[in-house]
Image: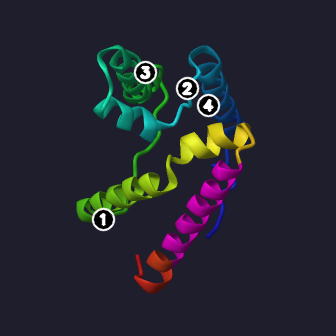
């Protein structure tokens, strides 16, 4: 693997990270809830009438953000090096992993680690380790 130093953008990455962390902090401070996407979506499927509105607004904001950024002139090239079957399999495996871990990377990695949760530390290490093993297997054993 090589890093394209001409395309390396640490400032935009830093700003994005600060925005994600700030949004997660505001969400827990103002709502008392963790900004874990799998929990928000999963809770929507079994939510009571008073619990649906904020979940729908949260998910709508996630879907609207790229379109808003595009409308403001930011456009990143989209490149997907996998066919639909691999993407579906990957999505199912991620969903299965979030069920086993009791949350997703945003819930554990962003919100849980910032709260110094030991459970989130273990889950995040497992997420990263599984991702590394998957990439190694896909590249070196399957030739993808």
Query: Dividing the picture into quarters, in which one does residue 11 lie?
Result: top right
**Element under label 4?**
helix
Q: Is residue 60 above or below residue 113?
A: above
Which region of the structure is painted magenta?
Answer: 118-136
Magenta stretch contains residue 129:
yes
Tell how many labels: 4
Please tell me which residue is depicted at 71% across the width and 51% down the height of the picture: 118
> Residue 98 at what x, y percent from top left?
45, 52
Q: Is residue 6 visible?
A: no
> Which badge, 3 or 2, is on the more N-terminal residue?
2
Tag nearer the camera, 3 or 2: 2
Mark sitting earlier along the chain (2/1): 2
Q: CA distance from mark 1 to mark 3?
A: 29 Å
Q: Residues within 10 Å of mark 1 (few under 14, many from 20)?
A: few
State the separation of the CA atoms marked 3 and 4.
16 Å
Residue name at image x 32 percent, y 58 percent: 92
Q: Is residue 119 magenta?
A: yes
Measure the C-alpha gap from mark 3 to mark 2.
25 Å
Q: Residues within 10 Å of mark 3 (few under 14, many from 20)?
A: few
User: What kind of element bears circle 2?
Assistant: loop
Q: Nearer the viewer, mark 1 or mark 3?
A: 1
Q: Secondary structure at mark 3?
A: helix
**Marks 3 and 4 close (CB-CB < 8 Å):** no
Q: Which residue is mark 1?
A: 86
**Image spot of residue 119 (x, y percent):** 65, 51
Q: Residue furthest bottom?
A: 141
Relative to the observer, which residue lies in front, 143 or 24? 24
Q: Is residue 50 left or right of residue 4?
A: left
Residue indicated by mark 4? 20
Determine which residue is flagged by label 2: 33
Q: Earlier in the sequence, mark 1 or mark 4?
A: 4
Mark 3 — residue?
68
């Amino acid at each position: 693997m090589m890093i394209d130093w001409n395309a390396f953008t640490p400032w935009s990455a830093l700003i994005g990270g600060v925005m994600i962390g700030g949004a997660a902090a505001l969400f827990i401070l103002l709502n008392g809830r963790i900004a874990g996407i799998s929990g928000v979506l999963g809770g929507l499927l079994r939510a009571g009438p008073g619990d649906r509105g904020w979940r729908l607004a949260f998910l709508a904001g996630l879907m609207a953000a790229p379109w808003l950024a595009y409308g403001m002139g930011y456009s990143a090239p989209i490149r997907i090096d996998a066919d639909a079957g691999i993407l579906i399999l990957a999505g199912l495996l991620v969903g299965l992993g979030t069920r086993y871990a009791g949350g997703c990377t945003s819930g554990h990695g962003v919100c849980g680690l910032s709260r110094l949760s030991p459970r989130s530390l273990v889950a995040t290490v497992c997420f990263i380790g599984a991702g590394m093993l998957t990439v190694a297997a896909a590249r070196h054993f399957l030739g993808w």
